[in-house]
Image: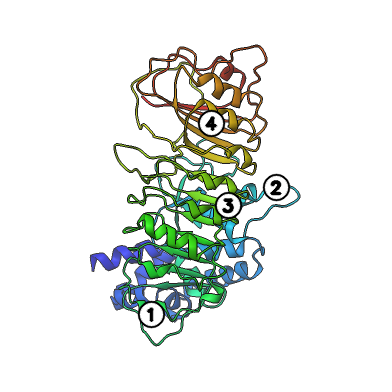
Amino acid sequence: MINQSKLMLNKCGGLPKVIVAIGRFLAKSLNWEAMNTNFIHQLENNPELASVHSMFSWLDSYFHNCPDELKPCIFYLSIFPRRHGIRRRRLVRRWIAEGYSRDTDGNLAEVNGENYFSRLVNLSMLTDAERDVNVAGTATGAGTGRRMAMCNINDFFREYIVSRRMEENHVFALEGRCSQTTRRTGRHLVIDKSWDGDESVFNRIEFSRLRSVTVFGPWKPFLASDKMRVLRVLDLEGTEGLTDNDIKNIVKRLPRLKFLSLRGCKHIFRLPKSLGRLRQLQTLDVRHTAVAGLPATVVKLQKLQYVRAGNTPEEYAVSDGTESSTSVPTCFSCGPVGNHIVGVEVPRGVENLTNLHTLGVIKATVAGLKELKKLTQLRKLGVSGINRRNHKELCAVVSGHGHLESLSIWFDKDTERIADPCSPSNDDFKPPEKLRRLKLHGHTDNLPAWVSTLKIFVTQDQ
């Protein structure tokens, strides 16, 4: 009874009208399990719950008249399990790969995706996963508070979306013990952690329309099929049992991927040379894996826009590398290294990836930093291993950069304190005008002198 009541309360999504109606109804019937099993159907059709029927009239009207660009983003949310924290960046990058968020005359796909996210926050479909923090849900981060890094889907809206997904949505899931006689079709396949892994059930899927595969359970080699000819998104974040050989097979069988996430897969040590075959790849996320360097063939991926990498030696944290920021402090304190990140090595020729706008965390080398100067579209950069020998080169990258909005620096923990980090060596230095976030991790005595000329958020590990 306690478990059923908790589940029921969650499904109400914090909506007082729904909570009151169900409370009155269950006070008479006490059939909690039946109500949970057919939650939306009961709310819509049971005459004893007539007080909430008007709510569904409004919802149906809203979804019927919902802007064409926003509707697929809403139904896409049903891919994620109930009470499952979703990183904002993960969701936006997936929307872009699916073609739901595109470049327009006024904005890049990235900005449009952030705006869609904000609209879902304003509709209360997405809620902050860290409720004790005040959040500004805007794509630009304007206003007080911080941008929402992790979100949850409001349980009530999720129940509603799932109840409609056979009509307007194209999400289907393998979960529990599935029937072998049902032919499954759709655009978005979800592998739930409860699925029994029956390969015969998997082989009955119609792969010709499949656009994305999201795995929440353990990996099975047959999940990457060469019949998935139009697959665009493969999201394996946190998937257990994935090995380097599995990645080789994935690259071989799924050459049209635009989004590949291996984030948190602890037993991935290196990416194959064949990665260069994924010529459509836009997003590569290997953060919190054991990958120490990107293969030389990555420079062939001319459409690559977003690369997240690096790991924490002490533990594999689950985050998107977006720490909460505070207002610009009037004083700057220094302390011991915390949350040390080891960046990945990047190959020569990274300067050719001119579409990159997010890169990090990478391991600093003098030659590598010099190549970054040609990546003029960078908006977010993370670099580890900065020390007295290379911090001038980093300064040269930052100088006068026309698009850089976020810069994260991890100082070499074995080096001496740098008195004035990222300080210009000549009078030609120009502060990056669009920089809004500066994160310093490690030993340093002062903020760069040019910081005072910018309106930014600053954080530093204590």
Residue 411: tell me if it is visible: yes
Residue name at image x 39 percent, y 42 percent: 132
First of labels 2, 1 by sequence position: 2
Quick check: can you spot residue 17?
no
Q: Disc 3 marks which residue?
A: 282
Residue 182 drawn above or below residue 261: below
Horizontally, residue 379 falls left or right of residue 228, namely: right
Cα–Cα span, label 1 and label 3:
31 Å
**Amino acid found under the numbered disc labelled 1:** Val
Where 169 falls versus 237 (above or below)?
A: below
Tell me the quarter of the image containing the C terminus.
top left
CB contact under 8 Å: marks 1 and 3: no
The vertical placement of 444 against 53, above or below, is above
**Front in this rendered view, residue 74 or 375:** 375
Q: Amino acid at mark 3?
A: Gln
Q: Which label sits on residue 107? A: 2
User: Which residue is under mark 4?
Assistant: 368
